């Protein structure tokens, strides 16, 4: 019996008073607060070091260098720049567009006018459709010519849609290139080879 009593006494846990429980809890709370303060101090110190060191500027420069430019092609082991249209072609396109816009505006005024006859309005409507067709044909010619390896191209069809001037940006205007361009132009416009004028821009 004495052995059983001693083993039971060993197994029984000591009962803590309310004061001892509060002391134990306060110790745990203090430890948790100390850990939190330590982590906060580490964070503040790290942030200060980051902002005041060259490391942040280096990372920023690397990330900004990785920003892509819209329309820029990227190749492995190759340095490329976005393609920029020459000032000549930009100016020529702008002049052509301005002239077309002015013509379309005049024709639209005739169509909308209450004082114009029905015949005049009909003729103006037909001209608007004709200009639209010319613009589409010019765009097709330019697309097909550049597809042949020409750097840049602008096509200008005359008012009668019977002739076209094609200005091209090529290093060498060979007979092969001339023949290809004329075939494209005659196929799209329905004119003869003699009605196609090819001009080298450079």
Image (cartoon, rainbow, N blue to C red):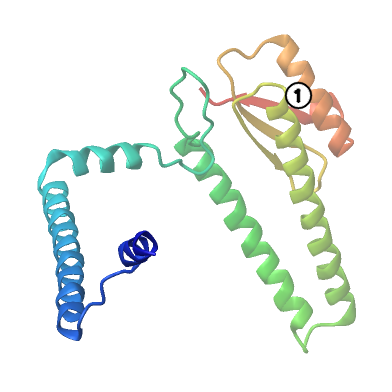
Image: 82 above or below 35: above
| Residue lying farthest to the front in this orientation | 1
Instruction: Classify residue 9 as left or right of residue 117.
Output: left
Give me the residue at 81% from left, 69% from top: 124
Quarter of the image for residue 61 reads: top left
Quarter of the image for residue 10 reads: bottom left
Q: Which residue is mark 1?
A: 181
Give me the residue at 83% from left, 69% from top: 125
Image: 97 above or below 65: below
Q: Secondary structure at mark 1?
A: helix
Image: 35 above or below 94: below
Instruction: Classify residue 35 as left or right of residue 127.
Output: left
Q: How far from the left and from the top, in percent, is residue 51? A: 14, 50
Query: Which residue occupies the foreground of this view, 45 or 111?
Result: 45
Q: How far from the left and from the top, in percent, is residue 67? A: 41, 42
Q: How far from the left and from the top, in percent, is residue 140? A: 77, 40
Give me the residue at 18% from left, 39% from top: 55
Q: Image quadrant for the N terminus?
A: bottom left
Q: How far from the left and from the top, in percent, is residue 117? A: 85, 82
Query: Which residue occupies the foreground of this view, 127 or 83?
Result: 83
Instruction: Classify residue 172 as left or right of residue 49.
Output: right
| Residue lying farthest to the bottom in this orientation | 114
Query: Which residue occupies the foreground of this view, 62 or 147?
Result: 62
Give me the residue at 46% from left, 26% from top: 80
């Amino acid at each position: 019996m004495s052995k059983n009593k001693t083993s039971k006494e060993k197994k029984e846990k000591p009962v803590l008073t309310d004061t001892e429980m509060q002391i134990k809890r306060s110790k745990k709370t203090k430890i948790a607060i100390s850990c939190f303060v330590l982590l906060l101090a580490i964070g503040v110190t790290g942030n200060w070091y980051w902002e005041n060191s060259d490391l942040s500027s280096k990372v920023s420069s690397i990330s900004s260098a990785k920003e892509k430019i819209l329309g820029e092609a990227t190749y492995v082991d190759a340095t490329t720049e976005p393609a920029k249209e020459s000032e000549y072609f930009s100016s020529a396109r702008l002049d052509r567009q301005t002239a077309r816009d002015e013509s379309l505006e005049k024709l639209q005024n005739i169509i909308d006018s209450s004082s114009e006859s029905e015949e005049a309005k009909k003729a103006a409507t037909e001209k608007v459709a004709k200009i639209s067709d010319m613009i589409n044909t010019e765009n097709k010619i330019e697309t097909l010519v550049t597809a042949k390896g020409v750097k840049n191209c602008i096509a200008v069809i005359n008012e009668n849609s019977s002739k076209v001037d094609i200005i091209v940006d090529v290093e060498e205007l060979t007979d092969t290139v001339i023949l290809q361009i004329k075939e494209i132009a005659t196929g799209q416009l329905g004119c003869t080879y003699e009605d196609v004028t090819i001009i080298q821009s450079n």
